[in-house]
Image (spheres, rainbow, N blue to C red):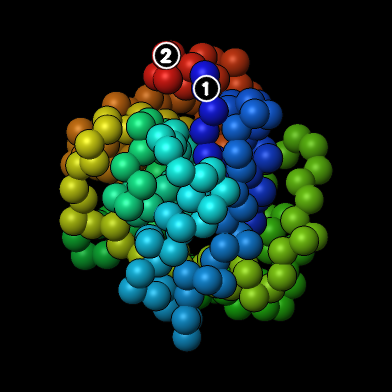
């Protein structure tokens, strides 16, 4: 059995991960969840509990295998402390999206503020440019169902959330990252893996490194769950 609850990334639906996890897995669009995690442009204190409840609502009771990509990986990690997943796969993860004095592999907050303004001016163009930076250049990605409010909530989440200090879960996560990632440097995943005792797999490729390596990565996932 290789069924997971899979969380997608900001501005990208989770269906893009179906080639990795299979049609029988359950997919949660974090863009639709984001407004429940934000209040007055900042994350609510119990955001991880809310996210865990959304996952449980989708998956039901019992053991859960959990996976997330990018922003979805951050949410999966936080929710994991309430769910205690049997397996955890983190794709393109980071413990903190914004750069801080004690965390250098992040974007400058001013760049995220600029993206917030850009979404408010022209949502579609901003998402199109973001997808290109992710390496999602093959095939059309449908993002017309996302409201400006949902996307802004996601960016506010990324602006404020810092998962540190990192405490290991009971399960040993597998982290996967692209060496050429322009969104989240691979160094962030290496720091994440070091702190939580996770197994890190690096691949040549961008933020969406998995886009051309579905067979290899799906085999790693299958072996993890066997």
* Residue 106: image location, x then y, percent: 36, 56
For the C terminus, the quadrant is top left
Where 57 sits versus 39, above or below? Answer: above
The residue to which callout 2 is attached is 226
Where 131 sits versus 122, above or below? Answer: above
Residue located at (36% from left, 47% from top): 83
Which labelled disc corresponds to residue 37?
Answer: none
SS of the residue at dot 2? loop
Is there a contact, CB below 8 Å, between mark 1 and mark 2? yes
User: Which comes before the other along the chain, label 1 or label 2?
Assistant: 1
Q: Is residue 216 visible?
A: yes
* Residue 223: image location, x then y, percent: 43, 14
Real-space CA distance between mark 1 and mark 2, rounded to the nearest whole angstrom: 8 Å
Residue located at (39% from left, 75% from top): 44
The residue to which callout 1 is attached is 2
Alpha-carbon neighbours of circle 2 within 10 Å: few (<14), some, or many (≥20)?
few
Q: Is residue 180 visible?
A: no
Where 174 sits versus 41, above or below? Answer: above
Residue located at (43% from left, 38% from top): 62
Looking at the image, which is closer to me, 165 or 66?
Answer: 66
């Amino acid at each position: 059995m290789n069924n997971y609850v899979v969380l997608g990334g900001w501005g990208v639906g989770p269906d893009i991960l179906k080639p990795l996890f299979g049609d029988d897995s359950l997919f949660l669009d974090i863009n639709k969840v984001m407004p429940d995690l934000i209040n007055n442009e900042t994350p609510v204190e119990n955001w991880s509990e809310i996210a865990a409840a959304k996952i449980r609502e989708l998956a039901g009771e019992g053991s859960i295998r959990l996976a997330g990509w990018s922003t979805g990986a951050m949410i999966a990690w936080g929710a994991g402390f309430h769910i205690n997943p049997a397996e955890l796969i983190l794709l393109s993860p980071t413990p903190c999206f914004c750069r801080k004095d004690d965390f250098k592999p992040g974007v400058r907050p001013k760049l995220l503020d600029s993206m917030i303004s850009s979404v408010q001016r022209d949502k579609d163009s901003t998402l199109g440019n973001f997808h290109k930076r992710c390496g999602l250049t093959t095939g059309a990605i449908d993002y017309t169902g996302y409201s400006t409010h949902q996307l802004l909530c996601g960016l506010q989440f990324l602006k404020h959330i810092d998962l540190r200090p990192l405490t290991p879960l009971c399960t040993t996560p597998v982290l996967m990252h692209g060496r050429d990632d322009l969104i989240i440097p691979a160094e962030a995943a290496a720091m994440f893996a070091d702190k939580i005792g996770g197994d890190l797999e690096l691949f040549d490729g961008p933020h969406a490194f998995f886009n051309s390596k579905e067979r290899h990565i799906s085999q790693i996932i299958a072996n993890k769950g066997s």
